[in-house]
Amino acid sequence: MTVFLIAMLLFALFMLFVIASAFVGFVITRVPFVPTYAGDVKFIVDKLKISSKDIFYDLGSGNGKVVFLVEKLSGAKVKGFEQTLWTHWWAKLQKLMTGSRAEFSSHNFFKENWSGANIIYCYLYPPLMQRIEDKFKAEMKPGSIAIVRDFPFPNMPHAEKYYLPKQHEIYVYKN
């Protein structure tokens, strides 16, 4: 009985941590955790021919799903940025369990330099998209690609646009 109560207490504390970190993450970023479908990631990798020569950054990587899939499907060097602790830690745990070479950072991606990547991916909300567009243009090398899901850059014309199942759109921008 005591072991059961201790287990329940630990589970309750863990769930409290998950809920609290999700709330704090939302307050900091104003973006909730919304996963991307695996089929959509496969479509992106195939359509844009992402390969082992690419360096791919996921801005707001959540639990690392996109990062891991891009790495697995293409062999690209991958990095995810996520400020919500529980999803960041979950991604790091998965990395350890799978032997992935992915990198994960809990730093604010606006304060990081993006020039090391030639592809960025984001599924973020409209209030952030102008800042992402500006940083993409300022820091990324010519020929770099931004893959933006559902909420396009406000001022930059997209090079390609794809319609995915479940009413999602992918915008591709080239610097």
Image (spheres, grey):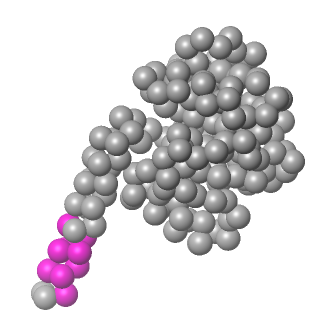
Which residue appears at 59% of the width and 50% of the height?
A: 80
Which residue appears at 59% of the width and 72% of the height?
A: 97
- The answer to whether residue 165 shows anywhere in this view is no
Residue 73 is situated, as x and y percent measured from the top left of the image, at 76, 49
Predominant SS along the magenta part: helix
Q: Is residue 43 depicted above or below 109 in this figure?
A: above
- The answer to whether residue 129 shows anywhere in this view is yes
Residue 103 in the magenta stretch? The answer is no
Asked if residue 59 lies left or right of residue 137, the reply is left
Q: Is residue 123 depicted above or below 73 in this figure?
A: above
Most extreme residue toward the bottom, as rendered?
A: 2
Span highlighted in magenta in the image: 3-12
Q: Can you tell which quarter of the image residue 133 is in?
A: top right
Camera-nearest residue between 121 and 127:
127
* Image quarter in which the C terminus is found: top right
Asked if residue 89 lies left or right of residue 38, the reply is left
Residue 100 is situated, as x and y percent measured from the top left of the image, at 68, 65
Asked if residue 171 lies left or right of residue 107, the reply is right
Which residue appears at 78% of the width and 50% of the height?
A: 76
Camera-nearest residue between 28 and 20:
28
